[in-house]
Amino acid sequence: MDRTLIWVLPVLIFLILPKSSSEDENVRKALVQFMEKLSAGHGQNGQNRGWDISSDPCNSTWKGVDCLGSQNVKRIVLNKLNLTGIFDAAAVCTAKSLLVLSLKENNISGVIPDEIGNCKRLSHLYVGGNRFTGDIPDTISQLRSLKRLDVSNNNFSGELPDMSRIPGLLTFFAEKNQLSGAIPDFDFSYLQEFSVANNNFSGPIPDVKSKFGEDSFTVKNLLLDYKNKSKRETIKGVKKGRVVNESKEPSSNSSESRTGGNRSQYSITSAEAGTTSSSLVVLPSPVVKDLKFEDLLRAPAELLGRGKHGSSYKAMLDNATILAVKRMKDLGISAEEFKSRLQRIGQVKHPRVLPPVAFYCSGQEKLLVHAYQQNGSLFKLLHGKPRSQNGQVFDWGSRLDAAASIAETLAYMHEQLQEDGIAHGNLKSTNILFNNKMEPCISEYGQDHSILSQSDSLKTDALGRNVAYSSFKLDVYGYGVVLLELLTGKSVQNKGFDLASWVSSVVREEWSAEFLTGP
């Protein structure tokens, strides 16, 4: 058979076959029903918001629905839409991949049904600012993935369910309801935010005097200002709002020992007390617009790695935006220099460079915020799992494209920042990340610790050579090593193995073809 025909047939079959919807028909029907009930039976309102059973929620304009790049509904945010109906938990929980559900500041009435316990993967549930009544269902405590729960400003009554059954709950807001009875046990070692003010609780006050280390979970906006301000260990008619408890004593247990496993949950907590949003500089970016420092403090964060000069985290904001946050310490550079440098890098626009979307300076602590890249690094694709999130194989063609793109991007940045003396300083496969289109992007440009830690007056090495000039050369060398990784599939240094030295010896012995390793 003709080779061209062999290649063309699969393409034709792909084009002829109908494209399947990301969510099946039963899920779409259930979600449309959920919207109809929220809209008080006015189905037209749902259709006006794009919720139509004939369309795909992941590939159309369903208002408030986001699949976060996947094939399943992950987030539903319907805040401030004047919804006046009821909450059909059974319908919405048909979307088994749902992570975030936010219905804040509407006029939804009725109860929260027991079926809310079917949303097994739910991590964020916000129903504050509505007209819900009845008990908070016990089945909420079955949501073992829940991190943020806001049921404040409603008309809930009865006792609170046993919230201690939810491991890793970070936020619980239930103020301004009609709740009564005793406050149940909470795991305050995890809670960052907690308020049950303006209810009708009575009984013993929970002990919230636990101590938290800098890298452990820090309790903020916590807890009780009560009507009778005596020191009695009972409360009656809790009033007021959220009181800050800032403990500076280190915990006897590290955050690793508390959480266990490799996918620990952290909070990104500043060591600086009394920090305000004004310390956070948000750069022009489509990723974040109204980001506040408090948003970062509240974000549950997964530790990605620790280095000599800081730690990196994957953080999810309340609106489910995912960011990469790097904490840097002891840089030896002033906040003004740090700010000026990052703003200059941010002015050089290139689609294959990941500039910080925000940064924070206070004392010796610096935070760098970037858009999180879900397809990981070049290092991971070469030495770990050689596929992207959508299953794309990192083959020879992909390697060649990556090599060309990295070279073009690096040359552009050098040209634009030559006069400023700003090189990358640490180009390597772990700093080359792939976006959702599987395009290689250079990250951490100009953020190498060895460069940042030298003031302008001291930017010469031991031999009197200009450090910035040397750093540009170092970038070229780093790119060469990346090319070797792409060609050989071997790690730069692994258990004493030095890739550059090994390649030199191979070339000298004239068996160069042996080191080429295909994907």
Image: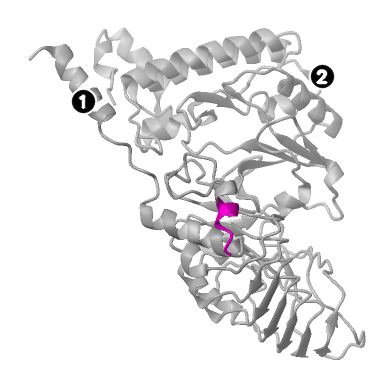
Q: Is residue 283 left or right of residue 404?
A: right
Query: Magenta segment, which residues?
Result: 41-46
Q: Position of residue 313 (x, y in %)?
A: 60, 46
Instruction: Name the residue: 92% across, 88% down.
Output: 230
Is 332 situated above or below 325? above
Q: Residue 170's x, y, as percent?
A: 65, 65
Give how far across and how far down residue 211 sits, in percent. Answer: 73, 69
Does residue 206 sit above or below 174 in this rendering?
Answer: below
Q: Amino acid at mark 2?
A: Asp
Residue identifier under label 1: 10
Residue 422 image label: none
Residue 467: quarter of image = top right
Q: For the stretch drawn in magenta, what is the main secondary structure?
A: helix
Q: Is residue 289 visible?
A: yes
**For residue 263, above or below residue 367:** below
Instruction: Name the residue at 75% across, 31% down.
Output: 283
Question: Which residue is nearer to you in this view: 384 or 109?
Answer: 109
Quadrant (top left/top right/bottom left/bottom right) for the N terminus: top left
Q: Residue at x 70, y 89 (%)?
A: 182
